[in-house]
Image (cartoon, helix red, strand yellow):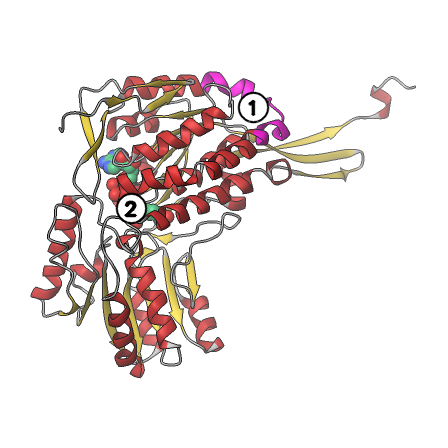
Amino acid sequence: MATGTATLQANYINGEWLAGSSSNVIDIINPATQESIAQIALAEEADTNAAVAAASAAFPGWRTTPPQDRIQYMFAFRELLLKHADEIAAITTKENGKTFAESRAELARGIENVEVSCGIPTLMQGYNLEDVARGIDEMMIRQPLGVTAAITPFNFPAMIPLWFMPYAIATGNTFILKPSERVPLTAKLIFELLQQTGLPKGVANLVVGAKPAVDTLLHHPDVRAISFVGSTPVAKYIYSEGSAHGKRVQCQGGAKNYVVVMPDADMDMTAKIISDSAFGCAGQRCLAISVAVTVADSAKKFNEALLKIASNIKTGNGLEKETTMGPVITAESKSRILHLIEKGVDAGGKVLLDGREGLGNNGNFITPTVLSGIDESNPLTTTEIFGPVLTVNETHTLDDAIETLSKSKFGNSAAIFTSSGAAARKFRYEVPTGNIGINIGVAAPMAYFPFSGWRDSFMGVLHGQGKDAIEFYTDKKVVIERWPKEWSRQF
Ligand code: NAD
């Protein structure tokens, strides 16, 4: 534990800022410098219970607030997020390490969801039909669930909480965010802005804790729905534990994303886009391309173009203007990634671009790394690396490439680069992933589309964002009515 920084009041419960009650005080570390930028006492079971109690108490009043009035808070929130965008982005960069431009970009993608949630008076409508039988009418209405919660990861501290919170609140639920305890400062600032909108107390709460806070949410009888984004093992735990406790659960897990490079692709453009996807955010994106499969004779041209671009990436502190790639999140993460690279090298893999030395300073830096000749069963191929490492493999046909990538247990995303419509269509049709990029490196759905994901990358039925979010945050109620003339006073 570093000294000299005051413990923050990082929890927002029932409209008040409070410190966590745990004796476990953690440092928030800047990954570019290894310096402590804040200290936080983690939230415990009691703090989380207090948040659930506040959200439960706020629900009846919030639920009866007209949707048109509820979205006024979202309009105001959007304005505040835009006004404070640079401040939010600077904090994201300090605690997460990504570049300032990347922090601004993720915030923009988060704000998109606030904007979509402003359409709730239309989006939340049900439907009806008169005369389902003579004189009988039927309608479906949507009602909010009650207390909802989201548990989010370190890699998009601003955007991912906004995949859930605006929809939950605008549909009339109350909400608790449990952000990654590694990056709580962005969430704190976002909640300070939400507070400025005058949102009634208890409608949105922030709890910065670790497993004890998560387990309290999973087991609490008053929590109706849980959204999770993070690694697959934790996603599986949350999905099974939350479901066993009667909650509606959606869990977005880890990934291993392939790209197929066809010989008819524009190699310079393809290499540039793939490099941005593999090394942007230091490879810590769930949609980052991690394996490139070159088809037929595309390998030589693609590899040359890729290495030229990747070796020009400027790794450094994300707050410095010239930096185009930041560090990875922790020193442990850096050693885990270096260990995986060693496994590939030990098995005969060839290092085409070597970033293992990093920058030789205190930060968690690995510079872009490219390897070839890595076997399908090597841990470098089977594991989610979550770092700036790309492996390139060669194959003869598109069928072989699709067969290879289909063996992955993950199904978050896959991409193809080609100028052939037939190849693109075959890829879109056959590949078993929830998001597909055709000449796109990071196939991140806009807020008005679901953020899909298949296999071990997603557990649940309804995804985050778009119409799925409305479905997830509402219960359908069907009313069948008969009003016989003879039962009513005649006028
Ligand atoms: P993580 O699974 O370690 O943590 C995610 C959240 O779960 C955090 O809030 C953390 O406090 C909590 N948590 C961690 N261990 C827990 C446990 N044992 N019990 C209960 N809660 C626990 O993930 P991370 O390292 O923060 O984020 C990186 C991962 O997130 C990667 O695997 C990445 O692919 C994934 N991710 C997926 C998507 C997607 O859309 N599929 C998006 C972003 C990130």
Ligand 1 shows up in the quarter that is top left
Q: Residues within 10 Å of mark 2 (few under 14, many from 20)?
A: some
| Amino acid type at mark 2 | Leu
Give the spatial CA distance, label 1 vs label 2: 42 Å
Question: Residue shown at 9%/70% (left/top)?
Answer: 348
* Magenta residues, start to end: 56-72
Q: Is residue 8 above or below residue 263?
A: above
Q: Is residue 37 magenta?
A: no
Residue 319's disc number: 2
The amino acid type of the residue labelled 1 equals Arg
What's the residue at 42%, 62% (across, down)? 436
In x, y percent, where is residue 15? 43, 18
Q: Is residue 342 left or right of residue 47?
A: left
Where in the figure is residue 2, as x and y percent of width and height?
13, 29
* Residue at mark 1: C-beta within 8 A of ligand 1: no
Which disc number belongs to residue 63?
1
